[in-house]
Image (cartoon, rainbow, N blue to C red):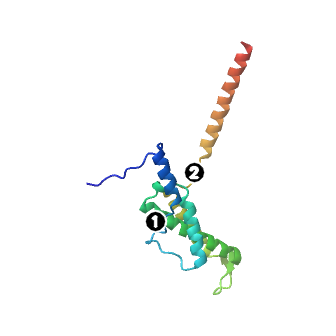
């Protein structure tokens, strides 16, 4: 029989002390996620990994979400590196075989990696929700109507 992991209540003094102590502990990079052999890229990966971990409390990270966070950090470092190379090379490069200008092939790799990164961040719950223009318009209209009702009720109070 599997036992459920019991979480400490944070509304007690002991729970708050435990949460504070846990916040000072750093998770390490999961061993099953390969590290980039380039030292500067590894440093970027680790900085992104630590920044990602700060988005949740220590107790909320499981082994699986740590692996996902490490993979997302690695993917983000890859995208940043490739974007820097595209800025150096340009969006259009000449094809050596045909002698014509073509779109830099790194751009398709960046696009695929960016979409994979977005999926990982959504799975971790670290992305902003997608907003629909109609939903924004409806909420703005509801806010205007509520403000008008409040204003009318204040005017009624003044007249009475």
Q: Residues within 10 Å of mark 1 (few under 14, many from 20)?
A: some
User: Residue 122 in the image: x percent, y percent?
Assistant: 52, 56
Task: Report the residue at 61% width, 76% height from top.
Answer: 40
Dot 2 lies on which element? loop
The one nearer the camera, 77 or 54, is: 54
Task: Give the residue drawn at x 65%, y 85%.
Answer: 98
Q: Is residue 84 visible?
A: yes
The residue sitting at 37% across, 50% down in the picture is 6
SS of the residue at dot 1?
A: helix
Quadrant, the N terminus: bottom left
Q: Nearer the viewer, residue 104 or 67?
A: 67
- Residue positioned most to the left: 1
Above or below, 86 relative to 67? below
Residue that protrudes farthest toward the top in the picture: 160
Which circle's residue, 1 or 2, is located before the other in the chain? Answer: 1
In the image, residue 87 sits, relative to residue 127, either above or below, namely below
**Distance between mark 1 and mark 2 Cα atoms:** 25 Å
Is residue 111 something one can see in this rendering?
no
68 sits left or right of 1 in the view: right
Q: Where is residue 138 in the image (x, y as percent from the top left)?
A: 61, 38
Q: Which mark is on residue 130?
A: 2
Rendered image: mark on residue 67: 1
Kindly indicate the quadrant of the structure image that contains residue 32.
Answer: bottom left
Which quadrant of the figure contains the C terminus? top right
Q: Where is residue 25 in the image (x, y as percent from the top left)?
A: 50, 61
Q: Which residue is drawn at 46% across and 43% down?
A: 12
- Front residue (pair 65, 128): 65
From the viewer's perspective, is the residue at label 1 or at label 2 nearer? 1
Give the vertical position of 119 relative to 35 (above or below).
above
Percent position of residue 22, x then y: 49, 56
As drawn, is 39 to the left or to the right of 18? right
């Amino acid at each position: 029989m599997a036992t459920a992991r019991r979480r400490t209540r944070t509304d007690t003094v002991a729970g708050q002390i435990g949460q504070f102590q846990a916040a000072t502990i750093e998770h390490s990079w999961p061993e099953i996620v390969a590290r980039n052999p380039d030292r500067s890229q590894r440093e970027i990966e680790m900085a992104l990994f630590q920044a990602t971990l700060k988005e949740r409390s220590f107790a909320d990270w499981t082994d699986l979400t740590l692996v996902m966070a490490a993979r997302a950090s690695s993917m983000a470092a890859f995208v940043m590196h490739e974007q820097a190379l595209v800025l150096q090379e340009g969006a259009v490069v000449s094809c050596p075989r045909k002698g014509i200008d073509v779109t830099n092939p790194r751009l398709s790799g960046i696009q695929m990696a960016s979409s994979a990164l977005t999926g990982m961040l959504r799975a971790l719950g670290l992305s902003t929700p997608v907003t629909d223009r109609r939903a924004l318009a409806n909420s703005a209209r509801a806010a205007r109507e509520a403000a008008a009702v409040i204003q009318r009720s204040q005017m009624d109070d003044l007249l009475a």
